[in-house]
Amino acid sequence: MKIIIANNKSLLKKFVKFPDSLYKNDNNYVPYMKLSLLNNLIKLIIIDKSYTAIMVEDDGVLKGRLLYTVDKNKQKPELDKCGFMSMFECVNDEKVSSFMLEYMCDDLRKKGVKYLTCTYFPYDQDNRRGILVEGFDSSPVILTSYNPRYYKDLLEKFGMKKDFDTLAYKLIPYNSPVDVFNRIADKAMQRYKFRVDNVNFKNLDKEIEDIGYIMKVATDENIYQEAPTIEAIHNIVKEWRVFLNPEYALVARSNIDNKPLGTIVAVPDFNQVFKKMKGSVNPIALLKMLYYKRKINVVRGVLQYSIPEYQGKGVNLALQLALGKAAMKNKIEYFEASTIMENNFLSNEAIKSSGGFLYKRYRIYGIEL
């Protein structure tokens, strides 16, 4: 076996294409848009030189790949440096995975890194996904991860331990006691004097400012990542703009002073479209996109926050109900709420009280180097 460092465009193309062979018989797999992924990796690896991509080859056949970098870790502020691994893909062979992982760990040790955490997705603001460890019976929805069952075993046999889990819930709009929830939400809105508005895309700067305020005030130690800056939110919106629908982007505001109190944002599951496109962008694939995007029947909630003084006062419920009504109007079959930290009690209980049930679990691993 040998390690190949993917440090040019030709090798990065092989890096990007490797999962095609690994998942060729898996009907739940959704390929990334290869050209977009390649361009992002070229920037990270060749231009910025901030990431390292490696592949393992055995008898002339690629057997695995991964990407890693060095950065700060909010949860381990005592460390000057932390290793972050992502895009781990490997055949079901412990020798292959250990060979590749040990090369990465060796390189990180030489750079003064004492702890590795994984697996994250590079350059993605919603990156708390980890390895899928429960829920292999369905395709991943947009901006979530998917992998074979054996990845958990490969990482744990190498010595990695669970850092934390994040959770995905499924809500079926038609199964919830909507009338009961509506009455509760209506009373809460009257008592605490607030309303729920759709995000106004014609006044997006102000809307982003309000959402940024909510996230900053609502973020505490139970939410793994720090609230993004206003600039970061602008970048997220720019990146996700094609996926956003004003009906699924909501802000709760005070009727007294218009103060933003909470927000919920969901995106249609474009993975249903990408699956049909098979990772390609060509005239036929684009025609498929135009056709199948009208048939999307799942939405994923990517943000839900409420400011502390309005938590437990019906804001989350009112936001979820408004989102549920939009989903039913558009004949959405189910709504995924993800990914939620397992120790974020308020968010988990809010989803479960609205009729959501756990159906996928992701795990972030760590290891001392």
Image (tube, rainbow, N blue to C red):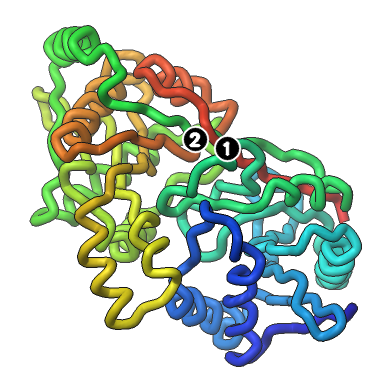
- Of the 4 image quadrants, the one containing the C terminus is bottom right
Q: Nearer the viewer, residue 42 or 135?
A: 135
Name which quarter of the figure residue 185 lies in: top left
Foreground residue, 206 or 23?
23
- Residue 83: image location, x then y, percent: 73, 60
**Gap between marks 2 and 1 measured at Cα:** 9 Å
| Residue 211 appears in the picture as rendered | yes
Residue 98 shown left or right of residue 6 in the figure: right
Nearer to us: label 2 or label 1: 1
Give the structural element (helix, strand or loop) at label 1: loop
Name the residue: 55% across, 47% down.
Answer: 128
Element carrying mark 2: strand
Quick one: which residue is furthest to the front in this view?
Answer: 25
Q: Which residue is label 2 attached to?
A: 168
Please report the residue visible at 66 percent of the width from the left and 54 percent of the height from the top: 119
Q: Are marks 2 and 1 in contact (CB under 8 Å)?
A: yes
Circle 2 crowding by C-alpha within 10 Å: few under 14, some 14–19, many from 20:
many
Q: Residue at x 75, y 39 (%)?
A: 162
Q: In this view, does 206 lie above or below 240?
A: above
User: Mark 1 = which residue?
Assistant: 135
Question: Of the residues shown, which amino acid type is indicated by label 1?
Answer: Gly
In the rendered image, the vertical position of residue 183 relative to residue 97, given as above or below: above
